[in-house]
Image: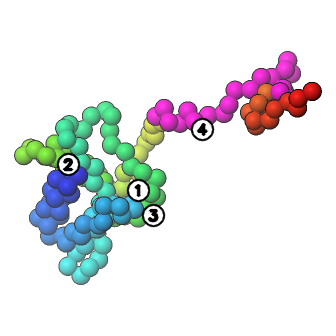
Amino acid sequence: MDTAGVSLVLDYERSCGRIPEEQAHNNPGYDVLSKDADGVVLRRIEIKSIGGAWTLFGVWMSATQLDENRTHPADFWLYVVEHADDDDAVIHRIHNPAGEATKFGFDDGWQALREPEIERDETGQALLSSTRRLLGWRKPEE
């Protein structure tokens, strides 16, 4: 599916008179660098190809892709290719998505970063035994 989406985007960029250069699959930050005839970078394009409709589940950008967007807001684009393998594929082109975002969601993976629960006394101070348990300390054997 990824290759179908990339191929559609390359064709689209050429149809707009730009010169797209597909990047290596593991290129950090974006998939296609699109230039004008003088070699000036016009678009850094991150492509998200999906096999069906673009739903509430959405598409995700990595921290590296977000950093690339923040570093190059003027020329960073997210292209979401719906129905990438079908004849009725649609390319949604979004300029500077990190700059336009008004909300950020947090999936259940964030639970690993939560503050741990500890036992406290009546004044709110952490109990020594609870703190030691979090640190993996054990009571010396008597």
Dot 3 crowding, Cα within 10 Å, few <14, some 14–19, many 20+: few
Q: Which residue is mark 2?
A: 1
The nearer-to-camera label among 3 and 2 is 2
Which numbered circle lies on residue 113? 4
Identify the residue at horizontal 44%, vertical 57% (top origin).
64
Q: Secondary structure at mark 4?
A: helix
Question: Residue 125 at what x, y percent from top left?
Answer: 84, 27
Label 1 sits on what residue type? Gln
Question: Residue 21 at what x, y percent from top left?
Answer: 24, 70
Q: Real-space Cα distance between discs 4 and 1?
A: 22 Å
Label 2 sits on what residue type? Met
Q: Which residue is mark 1?
A: 65
First reached walking from the N terminus: tag 2 or tag 1: 2
Q: Real-space Cα distance between discs 4 and 2?
A: 33 Å
Label 3 sits on what residue type? Thr
The nearer-to-camera label among 3 and 1 is 1
Q: Is residue 71 above or below residue 117?
A: below
Q: Secondary structure at mark 1?
A: helix
Foreground of the two, 13 or 138: 138
The segment highlighted magenta reads 107-129
Question: Residue 90 at what x, y percent from top left?
Answer: 15, 46
> Is residue 31 visible in this depiction of the protein?
yes
Q: Which residue is mark 3?
A: 71
Q: Real-space Cα distance between discs 3 and 1?
A: 10 Å
